Image (tube, helix red, strand yellow):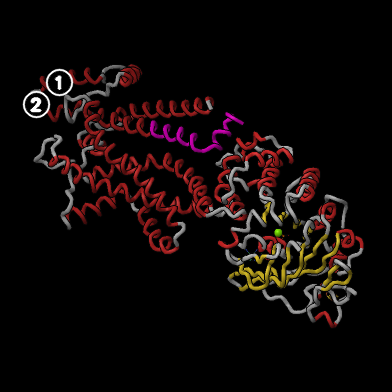
Amino acid sequence: MRRYFGRKLLVYGLTFFVAVTVNWMIPRFMPGDPVQSMLSRANVAQPAAVEAMRAHYTAMFGFDLPLWRQYLNFWGSLLRGDLGISIWLFPTPVTDVIVRAVPYTLGLLIPSILLSWVAGNRFGAFAARRKWLDNTVLPLGYVLTATPYMWLAILLAWAFGIIAGIFPVAGAYGYDLQPSWSGEFLGSLAQHWFLPFASLFLVAFGGWAIGMRNMIIYELEADYVNYLRALGAPMRLVRRYAFRNAILPQVTGLALQLGVLVAGALVTEIVFSYPGLGHLILQAIQNQDFFLLQGTFLFVVVGVLIANFVIDIAYVLVDPRTRTGMGGTA
Amino acid sequence: MALSVTDLRVYYQTLRGEVKALDGVTFSVADGEIMGLAGESGSGKSTLAKSLIRLDGRMRHAGGTVELDGRTLPIADDRAMDEFRFREVSLIPQYSMSALNPTRKIGKMVGELLAARGVPGGTAELERRLELVGLSKDVLGRYPIELSGGMKQRVVMVVSTLLNPSLLIADEVTSALDVSSQKAVATTLLGFRDHGLVTSMMVVTHDISLVYQIADTILVMYAGRLAEKAPAEVLVTAPRHPYTRQLVSALPEVGVRYEDRRLAGIPGNPPSLLNPPGGCRFRDRCPVAFEQCAEQPPFAEVAPGHLVACWKAE
Ligand SMILES: Nc1ncnc2c1ncn2[C@@H]1O[C@H](COP(=O)(O)OP(=O)(O)OP(=O)(O)O)[C@@H](O)[C@H]1O
Ligand code: SF4
Ligand SMILES: [Mg+2]
């Protein structure tokens, strides 16, 4: 058990290290000059002033140091939680910008992932025993999973936002409102949340439902099911076992799909101009805000790694085969 | 009479038509009898075994009856059969290695099975039975993956016989094992009967020479029908059906499967069961066939406890 987690931690640690390094490299070796972009925004005409500002910014961002120093400094400030200063929202620290956006992204991601997983698994297991459901609704599931997140998001925005006019299609709350705990604000928040949530939920739901349905059908043909049935065990018990065994690969599937789901959420935020991390990424690119881009990517990568680790642990807790495979209790 | 099967017909439904895998089978098994069921691959042994406990989705009960201890088994009615399964008819499957739910501790699984079947308690008895086959009660706290193949096989044997069934069906339980484990399993089966844990037994096998050591009688099938049934000793030393004669003459030492050398002298294959020809199904391969064989021979008693389906068996 301990060795297993030790190995896992090592793998996650390495992944983190590589991610940080790549992250550090990308803006530095990419075309475009962040300082130049700052200067052009400042719109100063006097060459002397421009030079002074350039020196100021270069020193501030650390671009005058040798690369290896920059790299070490990057790690140093990273460990202190300092991701630099945003250019787009100068002079707000990147960390603050991210912290402000994270609740929106999590507010979309967590409910859509958890609800689609739970509902998809339940529905898939249910469909596996109803021929008519299997034949009518499941093809829809296939269509849903095959739909790219962006398409469904655009489709929903168009149908319910623009044509039907039921839901707003941009922002996290009405432009005329200030964040507060008032009913009006919370209602607006929910309204703006619904479509991006629904598009994430639907695509993921289709995938889980199909996976579960196939797993259940496979489980119901397993030898242990035949044996139980031969001993007259009621379908209730057999289904319970089958569901439990079928859910295990779905837990692994959740870990594997997490990256895709997060990417889907980022894209969906862009479609709905929802002010989460996806929106930040778009803004960072448009404003050549390398620090923000870097910080956001890093944050996403770390988040996915942590979530994966949690799922790994959960899997070990629910599947005795991995537990015994580790030489723990055998 | 523990088991009595009359004119049983069970067909597989396939896209090309019905495979008549069990086509009019009549025999009985007495209280306390261990009957070996032999015959080459595809002769319908497993079909017969499954018919007595649980038809699979493609099987259709096309006719005939099965009576156990005087009660008719509703073999075509999956729900109604549940009452008889485990308590009256039980099964040791061929796939013992994978017969236990991999994600449940064995004790827990058995407990849940018993509770679902409305059998209270039973832990003490379970532990006693495990001891009988040389397992400690610790296995109840383990997952199947933590047991060796032989241990799993013994656990399954104990579970299957836990409710003292009237009829125990064992389908090819030894075919995946090495010779010494085969003997151990055979001895255990014999022990179940001798301790009165099961009344009668049907042991399906490829290995006549092994089943011969524990069986009281042996029933030989050929192409969905019965060929011969006789006391084990008689069947092996004085068979009357030409097919059985071939099987027995090719009988090797214990442990070597007759199938490996089976019917070396008989050219041809068994007929297709999709559209089997009329008359004796062994006709095409029978060295002593004659005109009358175009008619189906009855499965008739030629000596006490010795039944043969052959016009030449007198
Ligand atoms: N699911 C099925 N669908 C169609 N035909 C089947 C099916 N299962 C078995 N059969 C056919 O039924 C016949 C009898 O099969 P069965 O499995 O009872 O033979 P067996 O005597 O047990 O053979 P073996 O020694 O190989 O286990 C064979 O001709 C086989 O091809
Ligand atoms: S009935 Fe005829 S064909 Fe069949 S086994 Fe006897 S002799 Fe051979
Ligand atoms: Mg078979």
Q: Is residue A15 visible?
A: yes
- Left or right of residue A110, residue A330 in this image: right
Residue type for callout 1: Met
Mark with earlier residue (1, 2): 2
Q: Which residues are magenta?
A: A305-330
Q: Quadrant of the C terminus of chain A?
A: top right
Residue annotated with mark 2 = A44
From the viewer's perspective, tell me whether residue B252 is left or right of residue B277.
right
Structural distance between the alpha carbons of marks 1 and 2? 10 Å
**Where in the figure is residue A218, as x and y percent of width and height?**
53, 53
Q: Is residue A112 placed above or below A40 in the rendered structure?
A: below
The kind of secondary structure element at disc 1 is helix
Chain for mark 2?
A: A
Q: Which residue is mark 1?
A: A53
The quarter of the displayed image where residue A75 is located:
top left
Asked if residue B284 shows in the view, the reply is no
Q: Nearer the viewer, residue A270 or A249?
A: A249
Under circle 2, the secondary element is loop
User: In this picture, is B290 found above or below B56?
Assistant: below
Residue at 26 percent across and 36 percent down: it is A277
Q: Is residue A307 magenta?
A: yes
